[in-house]
Image: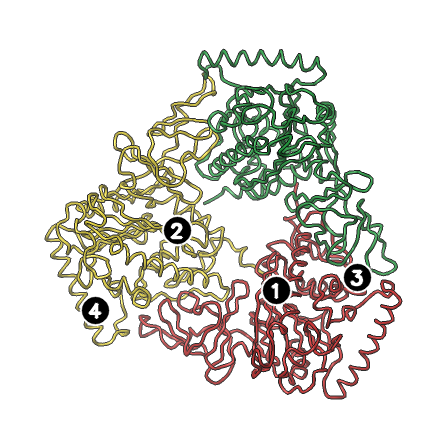
Chain colours: A red, B yellow, C green
Amino acid sequence: MLQTFASPISSLLDSRADGHSLPAGLYIRDDVFQADLDVFFRKHWICVGLDCDVPEPGDATVVDIGNSSLIILRDDDNQIRVVHNVCRHRGSRILNAGSTVISKLVCPYHQWTYELDGELTYAPHMGADFDKSCKSLRPVNFKSIGGLIYACLSDNPPEDIDRLEQVMTERLAPYDIRNAKVAHQTDVIEDGNWKLTIENNRECYHCSANHPELCVSFVDLDFGFDPEALSPEDLEEAREHEALYAERTRRWEADGFPSAAVEQLVGCATNFRTQRLIIAGAGESQTPDATAASSKLLGSITRKDLGDTHLWGHNSWNHFMGDHAIVSIVIPLSAGKTLVRTKWLVHKDAVEGVDYDLEKLTDVWVATTDQDSELVARAHAGALDPAYLPGPYSRFSETTLDKFATWYIERMRAHGY
Amino acid sequence: MLQTFASPISSLLDSRADGHSLPAGLYIRDDVFQADLDVFFRKHWICVGLDCDVPEPGDATVVDIGNSSLIILRDDDNQIRVVHNVCRHRGSRILNAGSTVISKLVCPYHQWTYELDGELTYAPHMGADFDKSCKSLRPVNFKSIGGLIYACLSDNPPEDIDRLEQVMTERLAPYDIRNAKVAHQTDVIEDGNWKLTIENNRECYHCSANHPELCVSFVDLDFGFDPEALSPEDLEEAREHEALYAERTRRWEADGFPSAAVEQLVGCATNFRTQRLIIAGAGESQTPDATAASSKLLGSITRKDLGDTHLWGHNSWNHFMGDHAIVSIVIPLSAGKTLVRTKWLVHKDAVEGVDYDLEKLTDVWVATTDQDSELVARAHAGALDPAYLPGPYSRFSETTLDKFATWYIERMRAHGY
Amino acid sequence: MLQTFASPISSLLDSRADGHSLPAGLYIRDDVFQADLDVFFRKHWICVGLDCDVPEPGDATVVDIGNSSLIILRDDDNQIRVVHNVCRHRGSRILNAGSTVISKLVCPYHQWTYELDGELTYAPHMGADFDKSCKSLRPVNFKSIGGLIYACLSDNPPEDIDRLEQVMTERLAPYDIRNAKVAHQTDVIEDGNWKLTIENNRECYHCSANHPELCVSFVDLDFGFDPEALSPEDLEEAREHEALYAERTRRWEADGFPSAAVEQLVGCATNFRTQRLIIAGAGESQTPDATAASSKLLGSITRKDLGDTHLWGHNSWNHFMGDHAIVSIVIPLSAGKTLVRTKWLVHKDAVEGVDYDLEKLTDVWVATTDQDSELVARAHAGALDPAYLPGPYSRFSETTLDKFATWYIERMRAHGY
């Protein structure tokens, strides 16, 4: 008799072995997906967009997270606002998907009208005794950290976002992401669970065989290696690279650019890691030849040799370089489908075709994202297979995956599973 | 821990607040959808078609309701029959979707053959002792009321269909819908719950901003308004219109055309409302200029000024005018998908291009149905959003929605939920 | 209140009436489908392919059964191997769907590399203490019987496959299927439950009205008839045919070709039936004119008059004729979708266009499979209909369906349902 789907989620959590990938059910079951949406995408801070998605007053954009639809907008006082895209009358969606420019938020169903701060100011035929003040659009908790918008759909957002805010506010300041320009955006739907998308992003063990474009500028061994797996030449090179980090980090920090690794990956609610990484080859940017794609550098940056400040969250990864940045946001669609939204940022005054070439700018991460999508689909298909058994993470090159799996179990437990 | 989907349907019913739209779960949950199908589309009378869908002996048409498939046919004695489209041998579908002409019902699988009254008369290889008399096609309870076919898939159909029958038999007689011609039919699939389709149809609060074509002939304020929401001019016009109803109703009834509102909307099994409504503008028909689309009037009608006899059921709406009628039937496909089938009826002898122009005939309700489809999809997307909260119905222009929601709760309770 | 979907599977099994088709739930419910997959496609022997799908060392082909993915390959020692297509690291699919040629099995994710016997020989960055010997690809139990590959995904495969093996090894020997050539293959997805696909295949009651092409060479009455259903002429012909069987079987067996019916259909785990059938008309093959399609006969066969050795399993049907064979494999995709994979086999040295014409070879079963697909869809649509009631099998022409339904219930019971 088939028992698999009858086991409670807590049993799946119990059965996870340290150092191993998760039990299959945690990747593939619909009930786990619903729990994941609730725990990780409602009760934790998630990255949803950027201040510069709505650069001008009246700009608004819709971001859907599961069945939630958020309106990110900039009001007439130049403040960012995030409200639920649900009319307080009978629940109609107010704005369509995509971006638009508005002076008020008017529900197309019965013309209920809200100011850009969410206040209901017009609701005809409701009677003189109708109290509009109780029917503002429901606000969403959010923080803009260095121009990245983090939202939490719960009323009790985790407090330890503070450390991320403190660390990244300083590190992102020179890049002025808040005033950057979104030069390009892609949406890729991966046929896999969101945790497999994140696991895939947390290791570069797969890079050398799968990401030829990325490997020009990215050093796959920076995220760990088994000395015994390398040839004497490769090992010497790897050791030299380790030494380089100490030297470069010292110099960058001396110049006022915080660079050392900071991570909060287990034993916490808000999961993040940042570090200034060395860019290989020409050393400037994640482009096909590792030279800068944009001649107008970001924010107040004047040097192309500041490496790659990477930032991970449990639903995002980011790379901030002198000339451009990429921001990838992960939005689960179902147990086996995950949206990866990638934005390429340049200086707000950079002009396509003059200051940067769009193909050079986007080539590496367009290719990398497509390659990763294929790998995530393979991993998910395997997790669906009854022959799947949790397998061992490399203790050299997959330690961050082990931490992610551990954090996942911790957070599920913390929310009653 | 996520509890939403664990709550029993009865808790959802309990949580409904008077004067407010339904709790989200009642619109979106799959278990509620299955219950709805059973309660409202199997155990209540539903409109499934028209006598004039099968105008000649041997005509047959298939109507699917959920997973049920009904054959509506006209037998050799000119009687309408409704039987289940399921062979009594191993259950094969007998007729395909759509309409056809038949002399017998022959199952294509093993040639079991039924007379048009459903009697099994041929079943080869079943042995001499096989009793064919027990294997007639299963009949469906139905009533033709003024040419509208109401079916009930349960063995205990509600008795209070009698009042609908009594009221509408008289009102529909002059239109002779039984012998009309179906000039056009459309199937539109709305991305929303069937109850949102019906709610949307029960109010005209949304008309002025969304239905420019319909508003030429339809008076949106006829279904209620807040005096304080209107300008002095609009209010005076609205008051005049109210006075007109008394006068016109008196005159129509004096001429032998019952016109006053009759409604059975709460505290009953069979939900309906009818009233003869005033047509605006040219006053004749729901067409782009409010003049009649067909020069050959329906049935025995000789006047174009008889207004619009509207009829609502819980799965249909109808407008009977002098020159034509529209019949819309609502068939739920899933919690979030609903089929709206609309038929345009004219006099059986009216000839397209001679007596009526098809575009003029269909323009208003084709446009209105498309516009409503968009609104229902918005409302359903909002109901799916965890930020949805039941909202207040206008006590002026949405009282019939409040009654519909109340009736829905009553009927669910009556069937054990 | 709707109770249907709340009933346990065991109640559905209890409610089955002898001589009747199964209760609807057993055809349509998702939970039953999951149980079916587990019981009938994991814990019983199923036909998955052919030795000659991988004719040369290094040939590999992927077969998906539910969420399981199997690699069938031929190793360097010319041995067939069947392993799970799941990397032992983090579960990635190793090979894509379809066929390929390989020297090793290399997972594209992190280059873990397995020999063709499944042994893990390369897993970089896992540390010196990592024990590769525990991480071979998981093997699948299988048997090649006369060139047909039967697999069992459970660790306790039923032992009574022995009788099938004993009977068919002898009967298939002259056809040398192990060394045949797959001349053509089709995948048809039927919109019905796998049991309806099998039921449809187990009777020829539907043949005369639905399979004109097949009926040239196939005698529909061979699988039973009601004498009272036939005209005197047809009855005489049918009786003559019965007499022919005794005579032909005697002659075939005297020539060393086992021909009598052998069946193991109830009271057993492994369900099969075989018999050498008479081919009608020209008597040689299942082709449009019943003459051989391939001039090069299979294996060591030298005669075209050896009839049709049919073989049924619970997920396959086969016809072995002098000139060619067809092998159909049934793979359930969901409660309402079933893949039917058909392979046409000829002598390995037969050349298309010289020794056989592909259209003549495939015409009958391409047409028959399409016709059956339509019938299965009709039967499934009917089983979904709440008006479906289990119907009586003909005790003349559907006795094998009754046995199949009985066996289905027995096996479910044997596995704890």
Residue B390 falls left or right of residue B286: right
Chain letter of the residue carrying label 1:
A
| Callout 4 amino acid | Ala
Q: Are marks 4 and 1 on the same chain?
A: no
Nearer to me, A393 or B379: A393
| Callout 3 amino acid | Ser
**Mark whose residue sits in front, 3 or 1:** 3
Dot 1 corresponds to which residue? A39
Residue B283 falls left or right of residue C12: left
Upstream in sequence: badge 2 or badge 4? 4
Q: Are marks 3 and 2 on the same chain?
A: no
Q: CA distance from mark 4 to mark 3?
A: 77 Å
| Callout 1 amino acid | Val
Q: Are marks 3 and 1 on the same chain?
A: yes
Q: CA distance from mark 4 to mark 1?
A: 52 Å
Dot 3 corresponds to which residue? A394
Q: Position of residue C243 (x, y in %)?
A: 58, 11
Above or below, A141 relative to A66: below
Q: CA distance from mark 3 to mark 1?
A: 28 Å
**Mark whose residue sits in front, 2 or 4:** 2
Dot 4 corresponds to which residue? B238
Q: CA distance from mark 1 to mark 2?
A: 36 Å
Q: Residue at x 87, y 71 (%)?
A: A236
Above or below, C119 relative to A262: above
